[in-house]
Image: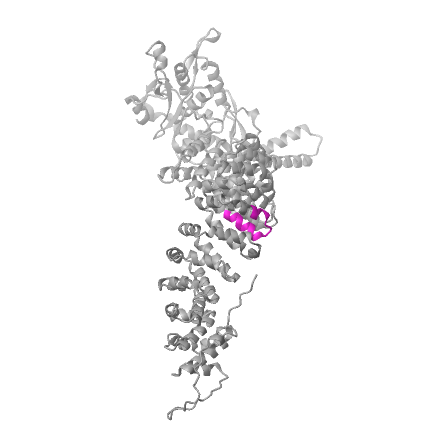
Amino acid sequence: MRNWEPRDWCQQRMGKKVKKEGEPPPKDAFDPLLIESKTAATVVLMLSSPEEEVLARACDSLYKFASKGDENKATLLALGAVEQLYKLISHEDPTVRRNAIMVFGIMASNYDVKKLLRELDVTNLLISHLVPEEDVVIHEFATLCLAYMAVEYTTKVQIFEQGGLKPLIRLLGSPDPDVQKNSVECIYLLVQDFQSRAAVHELNIIPPLLELLKSEYPVIQLLALKTLEVISKDGETRIMLGENRGLDCLLTILETDEFSDLHVEALAVLGNCLEDVHTLQLIQQSGGLKKLISFVRDSTIPDIQKNAAKAITKAAYDSENRNILNEEEVEKCLINLLETDNDGVIVAASQAMSAMCANLASKRAFGLQGIPQLVQLLSSDNEEVKEAAVTVLANLTAASPSNASAVAEAEGIEPLLNTLYSQRDGAIANAATVLTNLATQEPLRVNIQNHGIMSVLAEPLRSTNSQVQSKAAFAVAVFGCDADARTELRKAGGLGPLVELLHSKNEEVRRNACWAVMICASDELTAVELCRLGALGILEEINLSISRKNSFSKAALEKLLDNNLSQKYSQMGYLSSNNIITDGFYDCGQIKPGMKFSSLEELSMQALTDHRAIIFINAKPQEEQASLPGEEKAHDSSHEQTILSPSISRKSSREKTRKVKGKKEEEKSKEVIQFLSAVQDEINLQNTQWLPPPDLILLDYINDASKTILPLTTTKEQVVALAQGITDAADSGIHWNRFVADKMGGPIERNKLHDFSWELHISEIEFELKCNVVPIGKVKKGTFYHRALLFKAIADRIGIGCSLVRGKYNRAWNEVKLVDDSPQGITRLLLPPREYIVDLMFEPGRLIKEGSVEADQYKHI
């Protein structure tokens, strides 16, 4: 590469006045006085001289002094030389003016000098000296000063507003290489600003810049290419470049080995030009595109490879351009670039591949040949390389089962999971995308789940990056369809961050989080945990907002409550016929908005209060669940039932264990028995999960209903029988099988409802159990909400569809859908069922048509 050696014009172009020989000096003339000064301060004082020759020589001396280093420039600044020189750059004498501008040009490289020059607004004066009439030396140093100053944004604006672009572009055609170099450098700095970049198009800058590419000085060629690279980002400028055969000039540079130092910049200009379909077609038709791809493929220079890949990336943003590049088999070139040792080249090639993936043919080509290399790059130590590779895989596997399978065959699942731990957000988000793309195939989804993806996703869910949050939540929704996966996420602590994402202001994040919550709420344990973390309240708030609710928020809320019926009934006061009450359900009354919904275990551990009793359902036989701490035996007339008594449970359990061991091992000493018993108790307390005690009375109710009510032929008969009871003529004797109403105190006359002392009865049960939690089988005098709950619990077990609705003032009722009995034949079958309320209080078994006056009276009076 050639060296640029700026010319020292001061000696060649310093004008001198020569006295003609033979002329006698005038009488009043002062004989010349030769002054020799060794201090800069003295020379600066000479700048105030009225004599032009003194001024010219002083400027010449200061130029030489300033050229020796930055310290000298700082010295002159401190001596006030800049202010004095500023007065001289408009001097009438051309020599003084020229020499003063020379000093300005050389001193402007100093930061503090530039700052003062901006304050003096020297740019306007310098621009005024760029006219053709001025000396070429003035052009050289004025443009040099402007180039130094144009580094600062404020000066760029000044030069543009003062009309400096036009004379600078004209000076590109100057015969002097110094002027050319300074002018093109100043223009390169100016066009960094969009205003100047837009203006140069109108000033016809392309022809003079292309002429500079023919310069014998490499630095001028380089600056011209850099300027072209900046201004060719504008579409109109690219068209002008093509019209002036600039593309041929650029390709010629690439084909010339002597210009190897310019190849990188030439490729950068071509990269901008390739964005236009028309330009790309012209290059293809002339054979230039094939040459360009071949040049990149054969090159071993990283910067050239990198810029070529960037050029392809820019071109590939247009669909027609992608088709042209595919015709030239650019895919092979990019795949080859992945095998280089330079990380920058690999990143650029990967970005080009990502852009080309929008073309289906390119996508297939990359899938067949490039996926193994991309999977290997996921293990790179360079995070940027890893991100670029996984981004390509995300694009390749989108809607492409074959490419997804290829990733799995290349053993990419484990590296993808490891990428979820990356330090770059883009890598994490795209890794999650690839994994979800693979999950569209069931075998691959199972394989990924077996690798523990849910545990890994717990951390990306905590990210502060919205893209990562969105993709991680989407992945949870995709993989959460498996029960084991949901359990894994729950144990990994991923539900908490997932619930937090429901608060997101980002619409996509919020939507995907709602979707994930809906999927995760498919099992009861996860639904309960989500509710504990506050998901219900957040979803309710979202659904009340017109701007924040989405297609999944309502579904998530319903799914969450459907798998947590206790909270659904407490919060919404309604259970549909599809909401089947199972063991563990409890009714703790209507919960106020914003209040915490406590678990049955938490409620059972609370001290006895005068608040409303909690009624729970648990008909699971005792042998099906482990014996629990907190149980003791109680008896009624016909059943032995385990009930909950937290205050004395552990003590009584330990005492019973000691008695049993004492009887079986009488030969052992009392100390050994006590020691073993205590150890075993501690082990049991640590390993046993809390469960509510069984309600054997309720179990008997269900068994009786299954035997006597289930065989009835119509739903209506079953409903009526469950409400009031049924006559049984077995064993040659007629007797009445009592059900819900009779088991809860029988019919109550309307005018004597206030005398039905069910509250005292419930309080006695609570006092007996020393607990606020009461099994429903224990209740013998129940009001509306006790009877309706019992009816629903038994009906769900024997297959009678009914809903449970909570009203005000301890009211609750069941609604059933029945077909009207009056029509006959096919007409009856085609009629829609009607809703009825089941009377369980006044006339048990009576069906009240929904919407009637009687129905309103039952609900409210």
Q: Which colour scheme is used?
A: one colour
Report if residue 459 lies within the magenta region.
no
Relative image position of residue 7 (x, y in whole percent): 51, 70
Residue at x 54%, y 31% (from the top left corner):
441
Report if residue 310 lies within the magenta region.
yes
Q: Quadrant of the C terminus?
A: top left
Q: Which of 530 and 514 is in front in this view?
A: 514
Q: Can residue 433 be seen in this view?
A: no
Q: Which of 736 and 785 is in front in this view?
A: 785
Relative image position of residue 269 (x, y in whole percent): 48, 52
Which residue of the protein is positioned furthest toward the top in this rendering? 732
Q: Quadrant of the N terminus?
A: bottom right
Relative image position of residue 502 (x, y in whole percent): 44, 41
215 lies above or below 251: below
Magenta stretch: give its range.
294-311
Q: Which of 405 and 646 is in front in this view?
A: 405
Q: Is residue 58 visible?
A: yes
Q: Nearer the viewer, residue 591 or 293?
A: 293
Principal secondary structure, stretch drawn in magenta = helix
Q: In which quadrant of the rendered view does residue 442 lie?
A: top right
Which residue of the protein is positioned furthest toward the bottom in this rendering? 27
Which residue of the protein is positioned furthest toward the left in this rendering? 853
Relative image position of residue 507 (x, y in whole percent): 41, 41
Looking at the image, how many numbered discs can be counted on the residues?
A: 0
Which residue of the protein is positioned furthest toward the front in this rendering? 22
219 lies above or below 689: below
